[in-house]
């Protein structure tokens, strides 16, 4: 028993969970000091973000150049796009249906909404364009460059001379990332202390129904839809979630899926997903497979319609769904993405007051954890699904990886 307790205390999971709890306590009992901890969370995320693009580049170039069959690259990319569209559309409809029947916006006081509080988001929404999205989204640029570089290298007769140092560099990058992840408890502490200190638990009470609805909907989506996809390929969702538990806690503490993205890619490879599939699917999914964000956006729009007593017709609901299917795809490439997408959607619909976004300002940060975690799990499931589709999934490696991590519990 003492040995088991010692093993638990020695895990990163334990320290991240402890840090999240400590941060929440500091933010609650000493809000000013909690807000002052913001740089700890931000700097940790910024440091981890430095690893994302090098890992994407090295993973894809090494994987694609070693594929031999370049048709597979196009096939995986095409399947990924179809998968992203189908699953995010399903998430969108689930959010709309739940919000329609639960009515989280009924009886909400709208007198506190102020136009000046959301003017910045409205301006950003009007400035959005897909060209700007591609120019500002470095991850997508690196993804495209990596694919092209991998294809060119695959046709080079002396490619082994190039691949060998790239593999060596990849090893060093991941080793450095492992060292950085030891600071995850500090980042989680700073992120949670800031959130609780800045917004406070009291801000949740008026919109508790919306909060509970969003969290429950995402919970059902993860276990019903994501669980169903994994079940089809005989992969346990519970074991997968346990396998990536450290990354999930980091996402929870920092409210950012970026903070654990490189580590997720490494773990997916460890559990049997081929390097090329992981390299193509996860970075693309970070921008286009936003299940949690999609659920939140659909529920937020209907929440505002209910709050302002706007009786949407079936045609208007279909129109809103169509607009969200387009606008939600750019959510990861814009600062303040959730509000920018909501502002652009409400502007396009023109039946719900845009200034109503002020109602969501207080609780948005608390819902960002649910969005980030659902997005994160969704991208992991997408990689497993597509690896199985391509017969590029090693079940023996998965069983071994699950066994090793279970022994650390």
Image: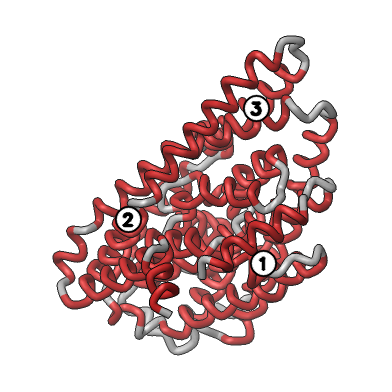
The label shown at residue 187 is 2
Q: Front-most of 318 and 53?
A: 53
- In the rendered image, residue 322, in percent from the top left (x then y), is placed at 69, 59
Q: Earlier in the sequence, mark 1 or mark 3?
A: 3
- Between 93 and 250, the one lying in front of the other is 250
Circle 2 SS class: helix
Residue in front for this viewpoint, 144 or 162: 162
Q: Residue at x 20, y 62 (%)?
A: 35
Q: Residue furthest top?
A: 157
Identify the residue position indicated by label 3 in the image. 61
Give the side of residue 316 with respect to residue 13, left or right: right
Q: Is residue 185 left or right of residue 293?
A: left
The quadrant of the rendering that contains the N terminus is bottom left
Q: Nearer the viewer, mark 1 or mark 2?
A: 2
Q: Secondary structure at mark 1?
A: helix
Specify the quadrant of the image occupied by residue 130.
top right
Asked whether residue 302 is in view, the answer is: yes
Residue carrying label 1: 91
- Against 180, residue 22 (above or below) is below
Q: Earlier in the sequence, mark 3 or mark 2?
A: 3
Q: Residue at x 49, y 68 (%)?
A: 370
Q: Find the distance from the CA under tag 1 to the CA under tag 3.
A: 32 Å
């Amino acid at each position: 028993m003492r040995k088991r307790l010692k093993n638990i205390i020695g895990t990163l999971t334990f320290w991240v969970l402890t840090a999240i709890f400590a941060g929440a306590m500091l933010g609650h009992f000493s809000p000013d000091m909690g807000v002052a901890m913001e740089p700890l969370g931000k700097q940790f995320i910024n440091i981890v973000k430095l690893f994302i693009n090098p890992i994407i580049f090295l993973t894809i170039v090494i994987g694609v150049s070693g594929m031999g069959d370049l048709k597979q690259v196009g096939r995986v990319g095409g399947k990924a796009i179809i998968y992203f569209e189908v699953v995010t559309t399903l998430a969108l409809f689930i959010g709309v249906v739940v919000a329609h029947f639960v009515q989280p916006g009924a009886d909400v006081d709208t007198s506190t909404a102020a136009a000046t509080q959301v003017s910045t988001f409205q301006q950003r929404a009007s400035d959005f364009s897909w060209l700007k999205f591609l120019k500002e989204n470095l991850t997508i640029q690196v993804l495209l460059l990596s694919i092209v570089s991998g294809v060119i290298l695959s046709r080079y007769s002396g490619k082994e001379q190039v691949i060998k140092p790239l593999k060596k560099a990849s090893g060093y990058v991941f080793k450095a990332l492992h060292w950085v992840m030891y600071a995850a408890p500090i980042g989680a502490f700073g992120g949670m202390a800031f959130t609780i200190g800045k917004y406070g638990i009291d801000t949740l009470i008026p919109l508790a129904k919306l909060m509970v609805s969003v969290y429950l909907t995402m919970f059902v989506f993860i276990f019903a839809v994501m669980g169903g996809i994994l079940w089809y390929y005989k992969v346990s969702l519970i074991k997968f979630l346990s396998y990536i538990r450290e990354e999930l806690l980091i996402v929870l503490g920092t409210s950012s899926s970026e903070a654990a993205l490189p580590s997720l890619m490494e773990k997916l490879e460890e559990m049997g997903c081929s390097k090329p599939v992981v390299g193509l699917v996860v970075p693309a999914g970070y921008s286009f497979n936003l299940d949690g964000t999609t659920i939140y956006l659909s529920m937020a729009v209907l929440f505002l319609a209910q709050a302002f007593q706007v009786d949407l017709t079936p045609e208007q609901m279909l129109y809103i769904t169509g607009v969200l299917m387009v606008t939600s795809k750019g959510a990861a490439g814009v600062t303040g993405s959730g509000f920018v997408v909501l502002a652009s959607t409400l502007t396009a619909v023109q039946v719900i007051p845009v200034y109503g976004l002020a109602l969501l300002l207080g609780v948005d940060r608390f819902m960002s954890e649910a969005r980030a975690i659902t997005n994160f799990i969704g991208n992991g499931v997408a990689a497993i699904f597509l690896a199985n589709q391509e017969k590029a999934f090693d079940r023996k490696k998965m069983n071994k990886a699950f066994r090793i991590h279970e022994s650390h519990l």
